[in-house]
Image: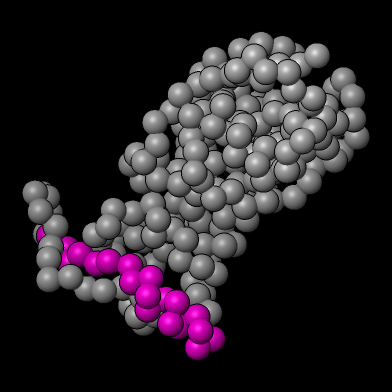
Amino acid sequence: MNFDQNGTKAVILDSISIDCVIFGLKDGSLEVLLVQHAEGLNKNKWALPGGWIYEDEGIDAAANRLLLELTGIEDVYLEQLKAFGDPNRFPLSRVITIGYYALIKEEDYNLTPGFTAMNVAWFKVSQVENLIFDHTQILALGLRRLRRRIRQEPIGFNLLPQKFTLLQLMNLYEQILGKELDKPNFRRKILKMKLLTALNEKEKDVSHRAAMLYQFNPETYQNLLEKGFNFEF
């Protein structure tokens, strides 16, 4: 019989699991959340947050439960990636895992390792290697999906302060897309979309020339969507 973290008996489906790719941005670097296993086959190894599904819960509920139990993070909108079902992805038996991903603001959450995790931490995506099973593959797909979405929807604004500069916004896109952008071209495209509200404010306490501050206008974006606007960057 298996038990959850509260000691309650739980029937686990040991042929289906969940793995979550949680992206964040810190000091201009794109990061991913990893947990260090405290027990079992992969003790002391780093992995994506995940685990088994209970027999009586849905997969979305399982993803949110596991993320909370392992990392302390809750109330995150998780989007499903795909199912990973290579016959040899798990060494002991046939296990299909369902991948999820999300993009969050790191400072909004306190990390607390729990359940079967001895540690939880943010790692720069560019420096991640040697994850367990096929977690590197799942991470790679999550990154590709994120890069595709950020070209189609203004999801990256969630990672910025409420007031930001165009350079901060461009740096965010460069980190997620993994390439340098042409500054004048970026500025022209983003301002042409009319999704930003220019504030009568500039940066404070900076060593360089203070830049204009902007805010993302979600109401304008929704109005444009209703008219058939397509966010392409």
Residue 233 or residue 64, whichever sits in front:
64
Q: Position of residue 134 (x, y in %)?
A: 74, 34
Q: Residue at x 89, y 24 (%)?
A: 93
Q: Residue at x 60, y 18 (%)?
A: 6
Q: Residue at x 67, y 45 (%)?
A: 60
- Horizontal relation, residue 74 to residue 184: left or right: right
Q: Is residue 87 depicted above or below 222 in this figure?
A: above
Quadrant showing the N terminus: top right
- The residue segment tinted magenta is 210-228
Q: Position of residue 64 (x, y in %)?
A: 59, 39
> Would residue 224 be counted in the magenta stretch?
yes
Q: Residue at x 42, y 76 (%)?
A: 221
- Can residue 226 be seen here? yes
- Which colour style is shown? one colour
- Horizontal relation, residue 17 to residue 215: left or right: right
Q: Is residue 210 depicted above or below 49 in this figure?
A: below
> Would residue 86 be counted in the magenta stretch?
no
Q: Residue furthest bottom?
A: 227
- Horizontal relation, residue 157 to residue 59: left or right: left
Residue 8 or residue 147, whichever sits in front:
8
Q: How many marks?
A: 0
- Horizontal relation, residue 118 to residue 45: left or right: left
**Quadrant position of residue 46:** top right
Q: Is residue 104 depicted above or below 93 in this figure?
A: below
**Quadrant position of residue 2:** top right
Q: Position of residue 104 (x, y in %)?
A: 45, 46
